[in-house]
Amino acid sequence: MPNITIIAGCLLIILGLAGYFGTGGESITALIPTFFGVVIAALGFLGKKENIHKHVMHVALLIALLGLIGSFAGIPKAVSMLGGEEIARPAAAMAQAVMSLICAVYLIFGIQSFIKTRRDRKMPK
């Protein structure tokens, strides 16, 4: 799970940097995915330590859940835009939608990992 966490964090970092520089550095808010990504990736690296693995992965998933909640509003905007509707700040809507997607997929992987770990602990050896 730490490696998946690092990958998710790196994807968010890339998304934020691409959004910021792709829009000419107009707004610092374009870097929000990068801020989330740095924290999540750092937690992924910390999660490689066995003694804090469980706690760190829970925190990483909590951060991803906050990222999903915060960026979810971009999905309907992006869908409207893809349907041909004009929207204000299309780059922001797409970045929010992609951040939401990255966080959602990461949460699914994390929840599946937690379920698998719990099942493996209950199985007799």
Image (cartoon, grey):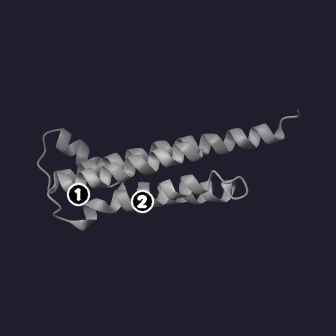
Q: Provide residue 85's location: percent of width, then percent of height.
A: 13, 45
Residue ID at (42%, 54%): 68
Residue ID at (58%, 60%): 59
Res 24 visible? yes
Q: Nearer the viewer, residue 77 or 55?
A: 55
In the picture as drawn, the residue positioned furthest to the right comes out as 124
Question: Is residue 101 left or right of 93 when viewed as pictured?
Answer: right
Q: Provide residue 20's location: percent of width, then percent of height.
A: 23, 57
- For disc 1, the neighbor class at 10 Å (few under 14, some 14 to 19, many from 20) is many
Which quadrant, please, contains the N terminus?
A: top right
Q: Could you tell me the amino acid type at mark 2?
A: Phe
Secondary structure of the residue carrying numbered label 1: helix
- For disc 2, the neighbor class at 10 Å (few under 14, some 14 to 19, many from 20) is many
Question: Is residue 35 left or right of 125 when viewed as pictured?
Answer: left
Mark identifier at residue 36: 2
Q: Provide residue 61's location: percent of width, then percent of height.
A: 55, 54
Residue 120 location, quadrant: top right
In the picture as drawn, the residue positioned furthest to the bottom comes out as 28
Question: Is residue 73 left or right of 84 when viewed as pictured?
Answer: right
Q: Provide residue 116's location: percent of width, then percent of height.
A: 69, 38
Instruction: Compute the Cα span from label 2 to label 1.
Output: 14 Å
Mark identifier at residue 20: 1
Residue ID at (63%, 50%): 48
Q: Nearer the viewer, residue 123 or 21?
A: 21
Q: Could you tell me the amino acid type at mark 1?
A: Tyr
Residue ID at (71%, 52%): 50
Secondary structure of the residue carrying numbered label 2: helix
Query: Where 85 sits versus 61, above or below?
Result: above
